[in-house]
Image (cartoon, rainbow, N blue to C red):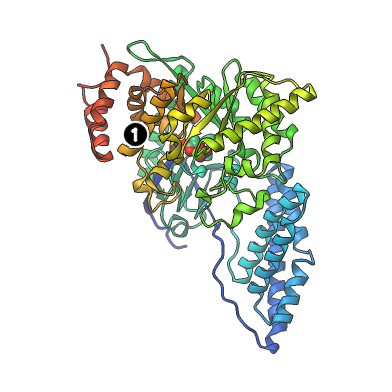
Amino acid sequence: MTERQVHILNGVPASAGIAMGNAVVIDTRKIDRYPKIRLSEDLIDDEIQRFYQAVNASQNQIEEAKSALESQNIAREHIFILDTHLLMLTDPALVDRVEELVRKDCINAEWALKVALQEIEKDFSLIEDDYIRSRVADTSFVGERVLRNLVGKKTGEFHLQENSIIFAHDLSPADTAMLNKNVVSGFATDVGGVTSHTAIIAHSLEIPAVVGLGNASTLVTPGDRIILDGISGVVIVNPSESQIDEYQNRARSFQSMELQLKEKAKEPAITKDGTYVKVKGNLEFKEEVHTVLDHGAEGIGLYRTEFLYLNRAGIPKEEQHYHAYRTVVEAVSPYNTVIRTLDLGGDKFYAALGEAKNERNPVMGLRAIRLCLKEIDIFKTQLRGILRASAHGNTSIMFPMISGMEELQRAKEILEETKLDLTREGIPFDENIRVGIMIEIPSAAVIADLLAEEVDFFSLGTNDLIQYAIAIDRGNEYVNYLYEPLHPAVLRLIQFTIDGGHNAGIPVSMCGEMAGREIYTPILLGMGIDTLSTNAFAISHIKEMARKLNLEKCRTIVEHIFNMTTAAEIYDFMTNEIMDNSNNIFDLT
Ligand code: PEP
Ligand code: MG
C-alpha cells in the first residue's frame, strides 16, 4: 500500500469547531465543456450504444446510492427523489429523443443529450402546475449524471459513515442543507467565502467548515485522515500522531470554552457602564429555533425563509408557510421574530422559479424583493403565511434587497392588499405588525434618511452591503482579500444608515456576519447600533464581548477610526491598541 501524503492546507474559516475524521470526496462540478462532433454514418450505432451504457451506469449508481441511504435510515423523501431520477432515466422524452437526435443529426451523444435537456426544460417552463414545473431541476441533475458517465467521469456519491469530512469543489446551500449532521463532522470546499450561504448553513447546522481551499478536493484521496480546524481555517491531511494529539487537546479546550460561554449565554449583555445590548439570533430552519434560543438569543433578528423553498418539490403552499412561521413565532415569543420575505436568487437558486437560471450575473439579477414583485402570487402566499402566524406571537416582517423608494412602496402596497384580503376573509393577524427593511444595497444606505420615514426598523445586511459597495462577489475566493468590513466606505455606509434611522426615530440592527465577530463589536456599539443578530454560535461570544466594554470609550474609538483612511490601519488599531493593549476600551475597573 502506498503511503498517504501529508498536506497542510490553508483556507477561510467558515464555521468554528475542530473536526477529525475521514475524507469523503464528492465531485460537484458541472461538465460544461465538450465538443459537438459530427459522426460518419458507420459510427452512429456505436454512439447510441455508448449512450445506453452511460444510462445503465447512471441507473446502477442511483440504485447504489439508494441502498446506502436506506441502510442509514435516511428520511423517505430523499429516497423518493432518487426513485424519481430512476424513472427519468426511462423517460422517452429524454432517452428516445437522444437516440433520435444522434441518428437524425449524426451528432455525438453529449451534444444530443444537451439538446434534449434544453427541449425538456423549455417544455417544463410552460407548465402551469408548480410541482411538475419544479421537477426540471431533477431532469438537469439526471442529465448531468448521464453526461458524466458519457465523458468517463464517475459521479461522486455520498457514501457517508460516521465522522465523514466532506471535500468538494463547491457545495450549494441546498447540498449543504442536506448534509446529515449525525455523520458529517466537517466540510471543506475549494471555493467560497466566509459569508457565502454555504458557510452560513454550516454555522446554522454547527458543522465546522473551511472554504476557499484552492484545490483541496483534488489533492485529497477518499479515506485520508483529516483534521479540519474551522477556527483558524487549517486543514491537515493525514496528520502525524503528534498533530492528532495536539488537535485533540485544542478541540477539548475549544469545547470547554464554549461550554463556559454557553452557561452565561442566557444572561443579558450589559456593558461596563450599564447599557443593555440586545443580541438576537439568525435562523435558517425552523427546526433550529430551540438551539438558537439555547445559545442565548433574545429574539430572532433574521429568519431566512428562502430555505423553505430549497430541497423540496414545488413552491410551498400558504399552509406550509404558516405552520413553519407559527412554530418559530410561538417558540420565540414574547421575544420578537423578524421574518424576512423570500430572498431567492443569487447563490440560492431555486429551479421552480425558472427564469433566474440563465442570468449572466444572478447576484445582481432577479433576486429577493425583485423576484417577489414580479411573482406577486408567490409573494402574497408568503405574506399571508407570515400575517397569519403573527396572530400567535410577536412578529415583524422584513423586505430584503430594497434598492429604492418605489420598490419599498410597492412591497408595502402588496402587504396592505394582503392584509385587506385577510380582513375580508375574517382571518386574524396582528394589524400593527412592524415592517422593516434590510439595508444591504449601497443605494438604500445612501437614502436611509428617506427610507426611514416609511418603515418601523432597519436591519443592516453587511454580507451584501460589503459585496455591493466594494464590487466583489461574496462567494468568490479570488477576491476574498477585498471583502473588508472595515473599509472606510463600508463604515460610512453603516454610520449613515444608523444616523438616518435614529433621526427618524426607528431602531437599527445588524444581521450580517459582521454582527457576529467580536472585533467589530466595539465599533458597532460606538456607532450606535441597537441590536446585533448573529448565528447561534456567535451569540455567547458577542454578549461576552459587550460585557467587557465601556460604551463611552467605544464612541471615542469610532471618532478615532473615522479619521483613518484604510481598513488595514483600522484593523491594526483594533487588534494592537484595543484588543491586546492594557490602555484599552475594556473598562475593567
Ligand atoms: C446580508 O446580506 O448581510 C444578510 C444578512 O442576508 P443574506 O446573507 O441572507 O444575503
Ligand atoms: Mg443579503
Q: Amino acid at mark 1?
A: Leu
Per the image, the residue denoted by label 1 is: 491
Instruction: Locate residue 65, reporting x and y percent.
Output: 68, 54
Of 381 and 499, nearer the camera is 499
> Does dot 1 land on a helix, a strand or a loop?
helix
Instruction: Locate residue 143, reporting x and y percent.
Output: 67, 63
Of 520 and 365, nearer the camera is 365
Q: Report the quarter where the C terminus lies.
A: top left
Q: Residue at x 34, y 34 (%)?
A: 491
Quarter where residue 483 is shown: top left
Of 495 and 172, nearer the camera is 495
Instruction: Locate residue 352, reporting x and y percent.
Output: 68, 49
Q: Is residue 526 above or below residue 244?
A: above
Instruction: Locate residue 238, reporting x and y percent.
Output: 42, 51
Q: Residue furthest left?
A: 583
User: In the rendered view, does 128 fall on the left or right side of 7?
Assistant: right
Q: Is residue 24 above or below residue 206?
A: below
Q: Is residue 408 above or below residue 46?
A: above
Q: Residue at x 42, y 39 (%)?
A: 442
